[in-house]
Amino acid sequence: MKEPTLGNPQNTIAVLQKYNFTFQKKFGQNFLIDTHVLDKIIRAADIGPEDCVLEIGPGIGTMTQYLACAAGRVIAVEIDRALIPILEDTLEGYDNVRIINEDVLKLDLKALAEEENGGRPLKVVANLPYYITTPIIMGLFENHVPLESITVMVQKEVADRMQVGPGTKDYGALSLAVQYYAKPYIVANVPPNCFMPRPKVGSAVIRLDRYEKPPVEVKDEKLMFRIIRASFNQRRKTLVNGLKNSPELTFSKEEIESAIEKLGKGLNVRGESLTLEEFAFLSNKLCS
Ligand code: SAM
C-alpha cells in the first residue's frame, strides 16, 4: 500500500488547484491538513486489517489514505459530485477503497454493512460535516446499523454534550441518546488551524464504543426517547408540565404525577436533573 501523500497544507492546496476546486459551505467542507491529528484519529479508532471502515465525507481523500493503510476495507460516502474525480485520483493504488457518491442520510447503511462486511460490525471513522452531526450519529444508532465504534471529529461543544451527565447546561437529549447506545470518550481537542478552510468553532475527536446491551433496561425505547425529548423541549418547565404539554405523549396529569412521585424527587423536579436510569425508570412506570 502507498504511504499517504495528503495531510499537509502544501499537498492539499496542490490538489485543490489542480482541480480548481471551490469549497461548498453548505456541505460543511473543512479539510484536515495536520498529520498529527490524522495519526491520532487512526490510533484512537484502533483499526486493523480485519476491519471494514465506513468513512462519511472523505473530501479529497486525506483521511481515506490513512484508513486504507490501516484497515482491510474502506467504504467512503461523499455527497459532493465535484470531489469524485479528485478522490479517484488521490486514492489511485489504494485498492481496498470503495467510493460511493451519495448523501449518507439517504443511504441504507444496514444493507451496506450486509453487502460489504457480511453484516459484521463496521467501524465508523470520519471528520464529520458539522451541520448534520446529530442526524448522522442518531441514524447510525436508531437504525441499528451493525457497528463496533464511531470515532469522529465533531464540533467541540457537541462532543461535550455527548459525554456530560445531569446538572450541566450541555446535558440534553443528545447526551442521553448517545449514552444509551454507547460509551463516549473524548480523544483530543483540535484547534481551527488544523483545517482548511478554518472553521469558526473548536473541534474535538470523540470515540463512541457501542454497547452490546444498553446500560439500562427499557420496555419501550421509543416511549423513553419521547419522554426525554418532551423533558428537554421545555427546559424551564417542571417535568410534570413538560410531559403534560408534549404533543408526542398522551398520559393524563394523574398518570404523570404518579409515575414522577415514584422517582422520589418531588413533583417540582426538572427533566435536566434526571439520569438515564431515572428516565428508564419513569418510562417503564408510564409504560405499565
Ligand atoms: N474527510 C475530509 C477531511 O477530513 O479532510 C473532509 C471532511 S469535511 C469536514 C466533511 C465532508 O463531508 C465533505 O467532504 C462534505 O462534502 C461531505 N458531506 C457533507 N454532507 C454530506 C452528506 N450528507 N453525505 C455524505 N457526505 C457529506
Image (spheres, rainbow, N blue to C red):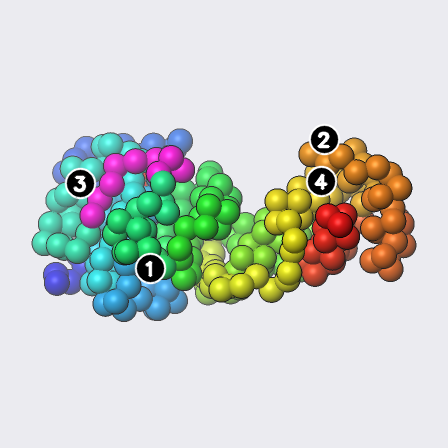
Q: Earlier in the sequence, mark 2 or mark 3?
A: 3
Q: Based on the picture, tell me whether residue 44 belongs to the magenta stretch.
A: no
Picture layout, residue 29 above or below residue 144:
above
Towards the viewer: 201 or 284: 284
User: Residue 249: horizontal and vertical position, in percent?
Assistant: 73, 36
- Which mark lies nearer to you, 2 or 3? 2
Badge 2 is on which residue?
247
Per the model, the C-alpha gap separating discs 1 and 2 is 38 Å
Q: Is mark 4 within 8 Å of ligand 1?
A: no
Q: Earlier in the sequence, mark 1 or mark 2?
A: 1
The span picked out in magenta is 98-107
For mark 2, does the 10 Å Cα neighbourhood hold few (<14), some (14 to 19), or many (20 or more) residues?
few
Please, what is the three-letter code of the amino acid marked with disc 1? Arg
**Which mark identifies residue 120?**
1
Secondary structure at numbered mark 4: helix
Secondary structure at numbered mark 2: loop
Task: Report ligand 1 position as a quadrant.
Answer: top left
- Which mark lies nearer to you, 2 or 4? 2
Towards the viewer: 95 or 186: 95
Q: Earlier in the sequence, mark 2 or mark 4?
A: 4
For mark 1, does the 10 Å Cα neighbourhood hold few (<14), some (14 to 19), or many (20 or more) residues?
some
User: Residue 20: horizontal and vertical position, in percent?
Assistant: 19, 33
User: Residue 181: horizontal and vertical position, in percent?
Assistant: 54, 57
Residue at (42% x, 53% y) in the render: 153
